[in-house]
Image (cartoon, rainbow, N blue to C red):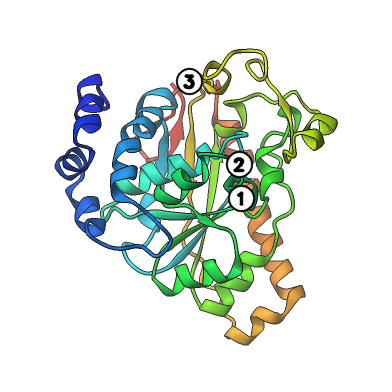
Amino acid sequence: MVTWKSIQTSLKDPLKALEERNPSYYARYAGVEDEFGFNLETFAKWEPVFRFCYEEHFKVRVRGIENIPSDGAALLIGNHSGLLPLDGAMITMAMSNHHPAPRRVRYMITDWFFSLPGISEWMIETGQVRATLANARKLIDMGELVGIYPEGLRGVGKTYKERYRILDFHPGFVQLAIERQVPLIPVATVGGDEIFPNFINIKRIAQMLKMPFFPVTPAFPWLPFPLMFIPLPVKWMINIHKPIMLDYPPEKAKDKKLCLKIAREIQYDIQRDLNRLLKERKSVFTAWTEDENGRSETP
């Protein structure tokens, strides 16, 4: 559990606090130089904040964490949501704190986020990587877990009435999986679409400010900073599917029709899972629990 005392300790000596609380994760990355700029100390400074969101604010429940391999490359593919990419942060918290072999997840981030002053360096040091095909290939060859949201920025910019309706996946992740012969792991996330209810996107203002979208929520742009960015305490469920190893030779990565077909199949599979989870949920503010058979339910 995240406490004020633990946050104070992390602020004084973040690396020592991480080593004491999560020795496996610390041992895996301490002293390891990363060509993409991951900085263990920066991660350690911010980890208690996101762990507080995970454990206390969103009370995230995760099913299927064991489906993520302890070693070797894999692609995590999920539905995107929430205006701010907190969905990736919550999966990172699950992977670094609750997996038998804690690992980082390298999320592929679109160029726009790297144009934000003060944000670009922070994202790099906490493990995110600019979304290019070359970078994705290199991460896979390094044996990393690579997180991809094939809806892109369109996914996080969805309005409230479009929540949990997956937009068409870009098939690039299928091309990567076939080319590099690595498994795909679908991930369905419920909760993120309601933390910042987006009533409308104002395109004209977005164009003026060179933003991908300009949302209007109950807090943004009305409340002062940082209140406008405080998410609602919606309770989350993350369901991690079993790995899918595509049974095709590497040269099939150039088959655009095949890659698009597989991308749609995975998209529809995640959509069906979202629909099922939403039927199980009784309230957006009620924490998920597990019944005696390991199924998710709300009390």
Q: Determine which residue is flagged by label 3.
A: 286
Choose top left, top right, bottom left or bottom right for residue 246. bottom right
In the image, what residue type sits under mark 1?
A: Ile
Is there a contact, CB below 8 Å, between mark 1 and mark 2?
A: yes
At 40% across and 57% down in the image, what residue appears? 37
Q: Given the current orientation, which residue lies at the most extreme right position? A: 204
10 Å crowding of disc 2: few (<14), some (14-19), many (20+): many
- SS state under label 1: helix
Indicate left or right for 258 with 82 as reference.
right
Circle 2 residue: 274
**Residue topped by disc 1:** 270
Do the CB atoms of the residues marked 1 and 3 lie less than 8 Å apart? Answer: no
What is the spatial separation of the Cα atoms under label 3 and label 2, in whole angstroms? 17 Å
Residue 118 vs residue 186, the one in the foreground: 118
User: Dot 1: within a 10 Å radius of its alpha carbon, few (fewer than 14), some, or many (20 or more) residues?
Assistant: many
On screen, 1 above or below 107? Answer: above
Nearer to the camera, 76 or 295:
76
